[in-house]
Amino acid sequence: MPLTHISVMRDLGSEEKIAVMNAVHSALVEAFGIPEPDRNIRIRSYAADEWLLPPGKSDRYVLVEVRAFTGRSAEAKGRLYALIVENLGKLGVPAGDVFVQVAEQPRENWGIRGGQRADLVDLGYAVKV
């Protein structure tokens, strides 16, 4: 159950926000093997005076931050990055304007399903992919 925060540099309409979130979620499902309904994604728009971007980035810049259980392989993470770029590209976001960061934590650091330690819960899917 990754926690995902998406930051964008411009104000998006409701449909475009949902499309961006779905693009990222689809990549998580395919690359990390999480169940499709397992989603926890936020999106936030920033004004130009609220975010200093790296040089050469456009107002289509997207930062995707994923917090996930430890255990995904380097290959699965690489697949995630590529799929996010591919999916956002279909929405008009240039590949060079996508930045993805994955932060992993041990499952015992997560309280899920009514406050249970995640390492004691049968998730119904494999974390080691």
Image (tube, grey):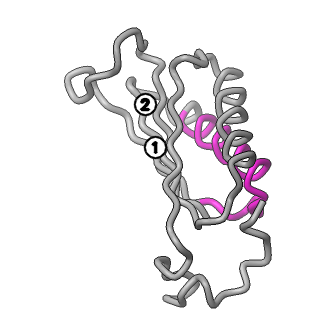
Kind of residue at disc 2: Val
| Residue pictured at 35% horizontal, 19% vertical | 54
Residue 40 higher or lower than 118, as above or below: above
Q: From the image, which quarter does the N terminus lie in?
A: bottom right
Residue 5 at what x, y percent from top left?
A: 46, 48
Viewed as shown, does residue 1 lie left or right of 76?
Answer: left
Q: Is residue 93 magenta?
A: no
Question: Which sits in the foreground, 27 or 91?
Answer: 27
Residue beneath label 1, please? Answer: 43
Give the extent of the magenta segment: 17-39
Disc 1/disc 2 C-alpha distance (Å): 8 Å
Viewed as shown, does residue 62 lie left or right of 73?
Answer: left
Residue beneath label 2, please? Answer: 8
Q: Residues within 10 Å of mark 2 (few under 14, many from 20)?
A: many
Q: Is residue 28 magenta?
A: yes
- Residue 119, image quadrant: bottom right
